[in-house]
Image (spheres, rainbow, N blue to C red):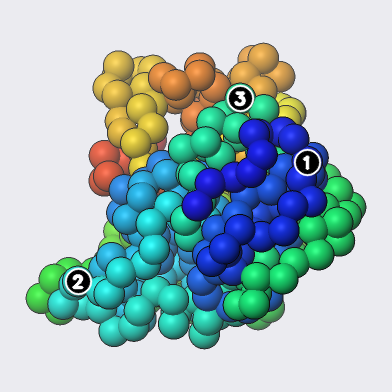
């Protein structure tokens, strides 16, 4: 199904025949489709992801809190779902938008149809949307606020949905890490997955890493465990004194959703004290952004963000180009970084900052996701670099 009328024009026309779902943007634009998943409505920032695989991992990535995900790849749901390919137990994304109807699963690992999985997590979705046109709209005009709604009878109060979209405050200034972080400290020893044995277990760790959970993906923790680490995961609001009392060899700053400046109001002073402790520090995504803030830099919201598994990033020191997995809507301003902070990686899409290190200290971070899940494994070496920093070899 297509959007009616042309982009940017408000409409109050009744739903076309067969429409059981709708996307309504804050400017009044209406996209009709077929509802999937939960019968409900949900408001959020409408973004797009260009990954070809890994939709279940994407939908369970805590960094998508507050967002409705438009998948540019048309065939979403064709391999079903399973209990292993998840990044958190309870998804926090606001919903999904896809082009083609969900087919029956065609994969030996599938245990549940995607539609049933969406219903089990109360996630609203739409199929039959012209995702190319919606993606172009986001690309050209930025990520809009919107509402997706699913009603089997095809009856929608469009005016009310427009009002909801207009009144939603947006992600800028929003601290969402507090909503997705763990509520209590716990230990993690699950390692990476293999075809024969499933997930492994770290039974002989050589180092102890404390991970600050701002919305950590499970595969990051698995990669830390696979690198020989005992991992202790702590809430986002844990103080530097509490973290250092755990006697870690290194400190990891996780990915997460929302505005880094908002979360940074309580996390940045903690990170600054951890850096001053002399411990090795490694940050990813939101952790990268807040490390930059702690070192004196600034962050801003991007117009459309980076979300996908095909983003080229250049390692400035080596000249090597990595194909990376990304999911972020805020960025570190390179020109805001103080002299002692070295830029290590840069996006070849738009030249934005993708990595930093603190000169003379075992402290570094990247904007992208070296653990992938989904995505390429070009950047797994960064976990080895963290171990080298812990061992004084970085």
Q: What element carries label 3?
A: helix
| Left or right side of 209 for 80 | left
For the residues labelled 3 and 1, the Cα–Cα distance comes to 18 Å
Q: What label sits on residue 137 in the rendered view?
A: none
| Left or right side of 40 for 192 | left
Camera-side residue of 6 and 253: 6
Q: Is mark 2 on a helix, strand or loop?
A: loop
- From the image, tell me which residue sits under label 1: 10
- Residue 122, percent across and down? 60, 79
Q: Which residue is drawn at 60% across and 34% down?
A: 138
| As drawn, 88 above or below 372 | below
- Residue 57, percent across and down? 41, 63
Query: Callout 2: few (<14), some (14-19), or many (20+) C-alpha neighbours within 10 Å?
Result: few
- From the image, tell me which residue sits under label 2: 106
Identify the image quadrant of residue 125: bottom right
For the residues labelled 2 and 3, the Cα–Cα distance comes to 36 Å
Q: What element carries label 1?
A: loop
Q: Earlier in the sequence, mark 2 or mark 3?
A: 2
- From the image, tell me which residue sits under label 3: 140
């Amino acid at each position: 199904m297509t959007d009616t009328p042309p982009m940017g024009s408000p409409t109050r026309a009744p739903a076309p025949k067969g429409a059981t779902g709708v996307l309504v943007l804050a400017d009044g634009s209406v996209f009709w489709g077929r509802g999937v998943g939960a019968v409900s409505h949900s408001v959020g920032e409408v973004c797009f992801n260009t990954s070809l695989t890994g939709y279940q991992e994407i939908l369970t990535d805590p960094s998508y809190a507050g967002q409705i995900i438009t998948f540019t790849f048309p065939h979403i749901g064709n391999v079903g779902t399973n209990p292993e390919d998840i990044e958190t137990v309870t998804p926090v994304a606001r919903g999904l938008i896809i082009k083609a109807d969900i087919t029956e699963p065609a994969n030996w690992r599938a245990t549940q149809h995607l539609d049933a999985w969406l219903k089990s997590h109360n996630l609203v979705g739409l199929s039959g949307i012209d995702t190319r046109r919606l993606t172009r709209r986001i690309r050209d005009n930025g990520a809009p606020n919107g509402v997706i709604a699913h009603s089997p009878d095809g009856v929608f109060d469009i005016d009310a949905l427009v009002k909801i979209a207009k009144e939603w405050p947006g992600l800028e200034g929003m601290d969402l890490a507090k909503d997705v972080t763990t509520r209590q400290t716990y230990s993690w020893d699950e390692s990476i997955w293999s075809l024969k044995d499933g997930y492994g277990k770290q039974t002989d760790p050589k180092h102890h890493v404390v991970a600050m959970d701002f919305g950590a993906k499970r595969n990051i923790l698995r990669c830390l465990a696979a690198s020989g680490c005992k991992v202790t995961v702590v809430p986002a609001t844990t103080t530097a004194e509490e973290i250092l009392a755990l006697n870690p060899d290194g400190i990891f700053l996780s990915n997460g959703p929302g505005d880094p400046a908002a979360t940074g109001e309580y996390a940045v002073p903690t990170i600054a004290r951890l850096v001053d402790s002399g411990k090795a520090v490694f940050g990813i995504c939101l952790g990268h952004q807040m490390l930059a803030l702690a070192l004196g830099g600034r962050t801003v919201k991007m117009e459309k963000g980076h979300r996908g598994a095909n983003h080229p990033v250049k390692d400035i020191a080596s000249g090597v180009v990595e194909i990376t997995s990304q999911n972020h809507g805020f960025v570190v301003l390179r020109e805001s970084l103080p002299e002692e902070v070295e830029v290590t990686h840069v996006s070849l899409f738009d030249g934005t900052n993708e990595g930093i290190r603190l000169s003379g200290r075992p402290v570094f971070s990247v904007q992208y996701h070296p653990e992938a899940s989904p995505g390429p494994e070009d950047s797994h070496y960064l976990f080895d670099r963290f171990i080298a920093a812990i061992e004084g070899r970085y």
